Amino acid sequence: MRKIIFAWGLCTLLVASAWSQTVNENLANLEKYQEELPFFQELITGAQYPEPPRNYDGFPYFSTRSFEKGGLTINRVFYPDVPLLYDIRYDQVITFHPLFSQKLLINPAKIDGFVLEDGSEFRQLSGNEDYLYDKNGFYEIIASGSMELVSKHYKVDKPARELGDYVGYYIEYEDFFLVKGDQFFPVKRKKDAIKLLQVEKKGIRENLTRNRIYFNQNRRNYLKALLQLATQSETL
């Protein structure tokens, strides 16, 4: 009987200690939460984020499954050091509640843009609503010049073909666009970009081919270099 009472008391003590630690952690966040209360009121209007299935190989996020300290622009006000995750499967930006440690969806209608810890910049753009993966309209801003070079990152989930630990997996894609005003021009082939930017073949040979910058090897670098060349040509 004494052993039972001792075990029960020890269990109660451990539970109380864990609860106390959680409360202390939340209280440590409370001061920061109160400082930024108007900001968090903007954030926590979204629903709780449903966790992706655990029995899938990979994750649905942009580059990491962990929260990053990023920058967020809401209603034209920029907030630094915001914990962010970007779900490119559904084009959703996620943060977490500082007291309850819940992942929360940020209302996309409030977001102007955001920057992730690695410097990747995303902005909500309009004008491409007919594009299948436009969804909430977040595009990475790659380069600006005579036009703007942007890309759309997205992941598509597929069922696993063989029996194993996972029932599905994610395939990642990136589509590129040249944008002028609210007009989007998809770039699927090299000649699409050359025609849009009106770059002469001689300039391409001297500046891109000579430096071994090829569309089929690295589309992002090629398009950035091509846009820079087109912009420089316009200023001459």
Image (tube, helix red, strand yellow):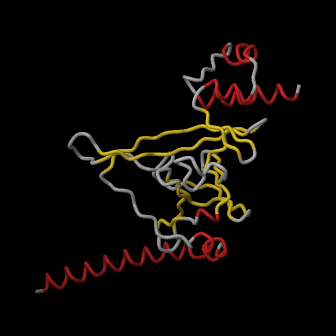
How many numbered circles does the render carry? 0
In the image, 34 versus 129, the foreground residue is 129
Please state the horizontal and vertical placement of residue 144, each as a whole percent of the image. Answer: 74, 39
In the image, 47 versus 6, the foreground residue is 47
Among the 4 quarters of the image, the one containing residue 217: top right
Horizontal side, residue 167 vs residue 194: left or right:
left
Please state the horizontal and vertical placement of residue 44, each as a whole percent of the image. Answer: 56, 72
Query: Which residue sits at x=14%, y=81%?
Result: 3
Query: Which residue sits at x=48%, y=54%?
Result: 90
Name the quadrant of the N terminus.
bottom left
Please state the horizontal and vertical placement of residue 135, each as a whole percent of the image. Answer: 54, 54
Query: Which residue sits at x=24%, y=46%?
Result: 165
Query: Which residue sits at x=56%, y=60%?
Result: 83
Residue sticking out furthest to the left: 1
In the image, 25 versus 91, the foreground residue is 91
Please state the horizontal and vertical placement of residue 191, each as a whole percent of the image. Answer: 64, 24
Question: Looking at the picture, does residue 223 appear above or below residue 100?
Answer: above
Residue sticking out furthest to the right: 236
Question: Looking at the picture, does residue 43 appear above or below residue 68?
Answer: below
Name the quadrant of the C terminus.
top right
Horizontal side, residue 82 vs residue 183: left or right:
left
Horizontal side, residue 6 vs residue 85: left or right:
left
